[in-house]
Amino acid sequence: MASLFTRIVQGEIPAYKVAEDDNYLAFLDIFPVAKGHVLCIPKKEVDYLFDLDDETYIGLQLFAKKVAKGLKQAVPCAKVGVMVLGLEVPHAHVHLVPMQTEADLLNFSDKKKFTPEQFAEIAATIAKNIEL
């Protein structure tokens, strides 16, 4: 059975996409810990990040770097934090979180709420700042 993220890649489930190329996809986390919280995934479904082949792993990191640069321009923050976690979706992914302090990245229990319109506006603002 395809993972939730594979279903997003295949267009079966909608997502607030911010960047995409042939191999990777970035979209807003629908349970964000900060405005602009983005997930970067390989389109290839592999459960565990460190099980990715080297080319896909390195490609994902380079893709996430480009997304993070655009994210920082779109959402004012001190830095964009990077975290790998998530046992609930069996598909490798990297979290990018705009942060002012380390607590902004480390407090994953404090989820923010946005309307669909707010999510769409945030995604569009980030997307226009990303150069792939």
Image: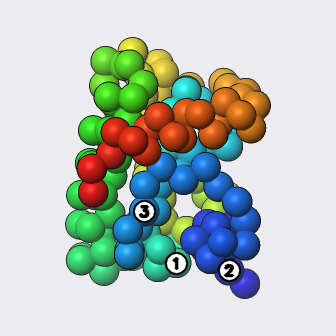
Please give the name of the residue rendered at 48% of the width and 21% of the height, measured from the top-left corner: 104
Q: Could you tell me how far apart the alpha carbons at marks 3 and 2 are, in whole angstroms?
A: 19 Å
CB-based contact (under 8 Å), mark 1 and mark 2? yes
* Residue appearing at x 55%, y 27% in the figure: 35
| Amino acid type at image mark 1 | Glu
Residue 45: give its label. Answer: 1
Residue 131's spot in the image, x, y percent?
Answer: 27, 50
In this rendering, the answer to whether 62 lies above or below 126 is below
Classify residue 83 as left or right of residue 117. left
Tell me which residue sits at (61%, 49%) in the image.
Answer: 16
| Residue 10 coordinates in the image, percent (x, y) | 62, 77
Question: What is the secondary structure assignment of the residue under circle 1?
Answer: loop
Q: Nearer the viewer, mark 1 or mark 3?
A: 3
Q: Would you identify the image quadrant in which residue 11 lies?
A: bottom right
Residue 2 is labelled as: 2
Distance of mark 1 from mark 3, alpha carbons?
A: 15 Å
Could you say where residue 111 lies in the image, as x and y percent from the top left? 68, 29
121 above or below 39?
A: above
Is 1 situated above or below 79? below
Circle 3 sits on which residue? 20
- Is there a contact, CB below 8 Å, between mark 1 and mark 3? no
Give the mark nearer the N terminus: 1 vs 2: 2
For numbered disc 2, what is the local secondary structure? loop
- Residue 59 at x, y percent in the picture: 26, 67
Q: Residues within 10 Å of mark 3 (few under 14, many from 20)?
A: some
Q: Nearer the viewer, residue 76 or 44?
A: 76
Residue reaching furthest bottom? Answer: 1
- Frontmost of labels 3 and 2 is 3
The answer to whether residue 60 is seen in the rendering is yes
